[in-house]
Image (spheres, grey):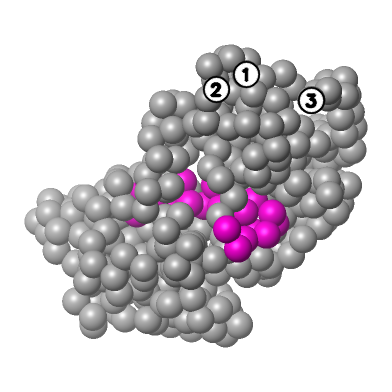
Amino acid sequence: MSLPDMMNVIEISQAGGPEVLKPSHAPVPVAHHGQIVIKVAFAGVNRPDALQRAGLYAPPASASPLPGLECSGVVVSVGPGVTRWALGDRVCALLPGGGYAQYVTTPADHALPVPEGLSMAEAACLPETCFTVWSNVVLRGGLKAGERFLVHGGSSGIGTTAIQIAKALGARVFTTAGSTEKCKACLSLGAERAINYRDEDFVSILKAEGGADLILDMVGGSYLPRNIKALANDGRLVQIAFLTGAKVDLNFAEVMMRRLTITGSTLRPQSDLIKAQYARELETHVWPMIARGALRPMIDSEFPFEKACDAHSRMESSGHIGKIVLKVTQ
């Protein structure tokens, strides 16, 4: 398959607000050993994209400087050593960067087949959230059936995915969100209790239930000591972001006395090998959830490729429920 030399991209012209995202052109990437090139149909929009745009999250030295950590599309080139994928295969993939483009390259082992019954737009919503939720909630957090699970930001892309996966695993799901509409959306996805953090206290609500066995948090800041109080004895707190700050005073005596575990991770810096292992876990455990209807991406909005700035404005307004995607090519 012959590919063009140049492609349309959205670049970060300088650090700043959404307006610094500008249409531009760049060479079409080449698939090296173990890699595939994907003609991008849809690109997912995620918080790290906005942090990178603002100059707060530098991509790894080996990654594309273009934003975009997930996409759906069609395989148009395979590098040496790739045996699983063939030209024309429909895939969704976790990306090292570069998703805001017509073509992107990624390790072949980080791609997954587009699940039957899902649109390309829905498939683009899967990689970043599923890799993050499964690796942190299940592999790191050890969530088990019957446990009480609290996820903050339940109406976010991560939150809507975490609610559904935890429910499918048999956990009791609690979540926080910032409006009645968002709380209703969380309940519709399987949450047992959606807590409006603007007028309810998640600590007292979880304590009344016996405490959370596992908490997934991306808020940080003042939530850290409150999360500790909301945990059951032997509970686990998994931190995946710090939207309101990473530094806080915390009394670790309670952690010690109640045998609590505090851990966390970020996805992007992890090795290609580890991400490939996560992909295999997803195909084994999460893709069957999609097949039986237990998990389906919730799309908030779809923006034309050239309107990436509007997509970022929508995300940073925090008014969205679910995922935001860019439509890149037909």
Was residue 135 drawn as part of the magenta stretch in this picture?
Answer: yes
Lateral position of residue 140 relative to residue 312, left or right: left
Residue receiving disc 2: 82
Q: Secondary structure at mark 1?
A: loop
Residue 92 can be seen, yes or no: yes
Main SS class of the magenta portion in the image = helix
Residue 90, how many percent across, how many down?
Answer: 65, 44
Q: Is residue 152 above or below residue 3?
A: below
Locate residue 288: give its quadrant. Answer: bottom left
| Disc 2 residue type (three-letter) | Val
Q: Which residues are magenta?
A: 116-137
Residue receiving disc 3: 1
Lateral position of residue 257 relative to residue 3, left or right: left
Residue 250, how many percent across, how many down?
Answer: 29, 52
Q: Which mark is residue 311?
A: none
Q: CA distance from mark 2 to mark 3?
A: 16 Å
Residue 208, how many percent across, how many down?
Answer: 23, 82
Locate residue 77: give its quadrant. Answer: top right
Which one is in front, 169 or 58? 169
Q: Is residue 93 above or below residue 82?
A: below
| Disc 3 residue type (three-letter) | Met
User: Which residue is drawn at the image coordinates 45% and 55% (left, top)?
Assistant: 287
User: Which residue is drawn at the image coordinates 68% and 59% (left, top)?
Assistant: 119
**Is disc 1 in contact with disc 2, using a CB cutoff of under 8 Å?**
yes
Q: CA distance from mark 1 to mark 3?
A: 13 Å
Residue receiving disc 1: 79
